[in-house]
Amino acid sequence: MRIFPILVLAAMLFFWLRNRRRAAKLAREAAVAGADLLPPERQNTDRAAADPEADAMNAALAQGTWEPAARALAAAGTDWERRSCLVGAAAARAVEDDTWLQAWRAAHPDDPDAAVIHATAKVWVAWEIRGGRWAEDTTAEQFAGFHRVLREAREDFERAASLARPEDPTPYLLQIPLYMGLGAPHDALHELWAEVTSRAPYHYEAHWRALNYWYAKWHGSEELSRDFAARAAATAPPGSLLTMFPLLNWYETHDDKAPAEAYGWPEVTALVDAALADVAAARPDHPRLAEVRHLLAYFLTKAGRHEAALIQFRLVDGHVGAVPWSHYKNPAKVFCAYRDKALKGALGAGRS
Amino acid sequence: MGTSLRALRALVLLAGFYLLALVVLGVFVGVDVAAWMRAPAVAAIKITAVTVVLGLPVLKGVFALGASKGGEEHGLPVTEGRQPELWRAVRSLAERSGTRAPDEIVLTGDVNAAVSEDTRMLGLLPGRRRLYLGVPLLTGLTEPQLHAVVAHELGHYGNADTRVAGITRRGRDAVQRTVEAFQEREQRAVEDERSRQERAAAKRLRKGKKPRKVNTGGAGFGYRMTAKPFQAYARFYLRATHSVGRQQELAADLLAVRVAGRDATASALRATAALDAAHDHYMERYATLGVPAGVLPPHGEVFGGLRHLLADPHRQADLAELRGELPPDELSPYDSHPPVAERVRLIEELPDDGMAAAPARPALELLRDPERVLVELEGAVLTPEALALERVEWPELTHRAVHTLVQKAAQPLRSAISEAGLAAGLAADDLNALLDAADAGRLWQVAGHLPKSPEAAQATGRAAREFLRPALEAGVTRLAELALVERAGARWELSWSAPARLVLPGAGDVDVADALAAAVRSAVADLPDTLPLRTLLTD
């Protein structure tokens, strides 16, 4: 009988050693299988995917040269997805310093590209003044500046819209954050939305910005944002990537409080599968394709679908400027942690 | 509750106050006796001194010692010989209200009428009565309206009303007086302690030592503690007599209706509410506007100037609107007055008494030689510092006052300009230097020297600029106004219906504000254009 405790100890030691060996082996295998994956310090946190044209544009803007931006926008032409993407990238630069934009507007006072960049940047300057805190932690000075600059931006957008091509949705869809900031009533947003969708019914960024307006924390409710996203996904043709929004809405509304297993629930799985099909059908140069893959990779990892997750991770590795990672203080670290979890999970699944 | 029951309750409440005072004083005496029996003489003397100091306010409250001194308002007493018509009116009102006429009439500088009485013997015996009448009230009300207001006040002491209300009111006065006496002493103690510590700190500083922080937490502690039971009783008393207080107000209103008529009483309440707002505005924007510049309006105009404001057609329209909609007062548990809106409603619901408010002369005409009264009132209610100020006519006062305010408002920008190394001297030179900097693309470098909030200081890029833009725009506008005064002899013009406007000589009645605002906006725009402002200043 005395030998019994010793047997138990020996068994424990055996299993512990075996687990350790297996973990070490898995780590070795993962290192081999993931040799092509980049460490956190080599992840680009500014973008969701590589975009050499935008990089070149930004580099030129940093030098105060606006011509490459004008060329890139001219090249985008009527690709409205690409156009709003480039306008956003240029406007982001103009929030810090708009000397180049002033030079551009002085040289070409009626340029529609410069006009819409100017108006968009104005709205973002306003949000910068307001800051991201709750209303009670925002000072009267901040609110006064926020509203004053937004009111100016409204005039700038009127001008941008009058200069733009009649079929261009950009000066309308980029006004949605302005409506959100000024607390425009639902009717007003519906009117603006009609201007957008009559020009581009399935525009990805337009839906992203409108979904923000419909969130309960802004001017909608859980029901309104869910319905908006569901309707968009249901009516859009495959490949337009609007299946992103039910997923995004679920993430924004439930991620904080949902239990881990919620990601495996049938309704969530259905949203993920719809987005996977959409991604497969999308044109490969869709400017927002990588954004959807980032969120899909997160949902698939959470649901334990590691192999499917790893496919998405491999397609976007190297750039982490996307939801959900951008919500964290260190996006690259969080991205790599989830990616490595998917990698190990995929290897483990392959063996058993 | 019947009258006798209410009388009983009022007496019990009043008796409770005296009982409380006796208990507190008894405790003090007990402590003293114990100290003399048990403690060494030095400690006993100290303890006795403390209890005497703390007990004084209690005695003061009970016997109303010096109450007439503490409760007296600043004002100008007017004798019957000097103002026979006013006295005649008040006597007649007292008679019709069934009460004794006041022994004194005191004119004051606010929109208020009140009656006070120095009661004696535990507040149960009547004393000297004083009627306080605000001259602004005389200015803004008609004669029948003033009758209604005075009748209401006299009604509080009327025998025709109820004796109970009188007792309740006296009781409330006594309780409040005690609490106030404590607060006064506590404050004085704290202030004495502060100045003592400040003197000590200054002395330490002179000796080259680090000064101690001023801390007055301990001073007045004894007063605070002794006051506590009285404050609690005051709260209880006020709440318990609240409904009586309300009934008393409504009863006084009914008396005023009987004496002065329904319409005059209701319109007096409406007019007083509107007049109060107008008077506040007048005092802030007109009468004391020149104080920072060291000037007051001419003798008699500090209170008399309200007449100009009330005579202005624009203001009359505003006042008519104010009289139309009465603000719903917030109810405080200590306030014995029901909301004015409710009082007006109750009065206006009464049947027509045939005393419709006919056009009547202003109440101020009850006074003999009102101009002299207005001058004397200033002497009675203004502080010596205010009386020492220079007196100038209204137009001159307006210009000098606004000029001083604008100079002050332009100061942050002028400091910023000088910190940026561009200081020039005159406002016009400062402005030129700033406009040159704007043309050279250095406007925001200069603006960066303006005072910033923590949020503004943290902002970068264009957001930082936008934080500064309102202050910059305002500063440039003020600076341009000063330059227009320097260069073109522009002056701020008095208006009884609107804020003062800057007017250029020879430009007639043209306001420069709009042109100036547009020029300033383009001068501080992201792509600055200083030409409109430069043109405006040189033309």
Image (tube, helix red, strand yellow):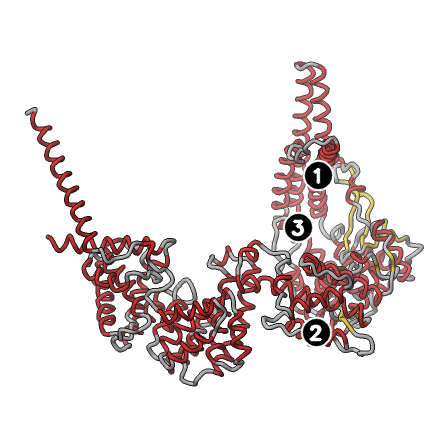
Specify whether B431 is left or right of B459: right
Residue located at (25% from left, 64% from top): A315
In the rendering, which numbered label is found on residue B187? 1
The residue tagged 2 is B533
Q: Give amino acid for label 3.
A: Gly
Q: Position of residue A259 (x, y in %)?
A: 27, 53
SS category of the residue bearing label 1: helix
Q: Give amino acid for label 2.
A: Leu
* Nearest to N terminus: mark 2 or mark 3: 3
The residue tagged 3 is B245
Is residue B227 at all visible to an observer of this figure? yes
Q: Position of residue B390 (x, y in %)?
A: 87, 57
Residue located at (70% from left, 74% from top): B533
Displayed quadrant of residue B504: bottom right
* Nearest to N terminus: mark 3 or mark 1: 1
Q: Give amino acid for label 1.
A: Gln
- Using a 10 Å C-alpha cutoff, classify the residue at mark 2 as few (fewer than 14 neighbours), some (14 to 19) or many (20 or more): many
Q: Nearer the viewer's eye, disc 2 or disc 3? A: 2
Q: Report the chain holding disc 3.
A: B
Tell me how far mark 2 sits from mark 1, CA to CA. 54 Å
Q: Are the residues under marks 2 and 1 on the same chain?
A: yes
The vertical placement of A70 against B114, above or below, is: below
SS category of the residue bearing label 3: helix
- Using a 10 Å C-alpha cutoff, classify the residue at mark 1 as few (fewer than 14 neighbours), some (14 to 19) or many (20 or more): some
Is residue B101 at all visible to an observer of this figure? no
Q: Nearer the viewer's eye, disc 2 or disc 1? A: 2
Q: Are the residues under marks 2 and 3 on the same chain?
A: yes
Q: Report the chain holding disc 1.
A: B
Displayed quadrant of residue B479: bottom right
Q: Report the chain holding disc 2.
A: B
